[in-house]
Image (spheres, grey):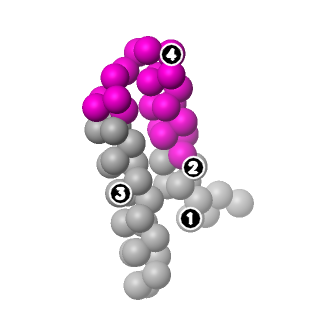
Amino acid sequence: FLAGKKTYITAVTGIVAAIGAYLIGEMDLVQTFQTIWPLITVAFLRKGVEDTL
């Protein structure tokens, strides 16, 4: 059921958590970006590896 989707689910969960932390004031904009950028990178990297295999 979750085969191949766990990476995307984890990335989306992290992005939502980072945006939520920003909205309630726990993180500033720079920290939010520093959290979201690697998550987006992992999702695109996973897609690239998936396409080449």
* Spatial CA span between label 3 and label 2: 14 Å
The residue identified by callout 2 is 9
Label 3 SS: helix
* Residue range (magenta): 12-32
Give the number of the disc on residue 24. Answer: 4
10 Å neighbourhood of mark 4: few (<14), some, or many (≥20)? few
Looking at the image, which residue is at 40% across and 75% down?
48
Give the mark toward the camera: 3 or 1. 3
Q: Residues within 10 Å of mark 2 (few under 14, many from 20)?
A: few
Q: Which mark is residue 4?
A: 1
Specify the amino acid type for callout 1. Answer: Gly
Task: State the count of labels.
Answer: 4
Q: Give the residue at the far right of this rendering.
A: 1
State yes or no: discs 4 and 1 in contact (Cβ < 8 Å).
no
Dot in front, 2 or 4: 4
Q: Which of pointers 4 and 3 indicates the residue nearer the eye?
A: 4
Q: Which one is nearer the viewer's eye here, 22 or 8?
A: 22
Callout 4 amino acid:
Ile
Residue 41 badge: 3
Are the residues tagged 4 and 3 within 8 Å (C-beta)?
no
Distance between the alpha carbons at the discs numbered 3 and 1: 16 Å
Give the Cα distance between marks 4 and 1: 32 Å
The amino acid type, in three-letter code, at marker 2 is: Ile
Q: Which callout, 2 or 1, points to the residue nearer the camera?
A: 2
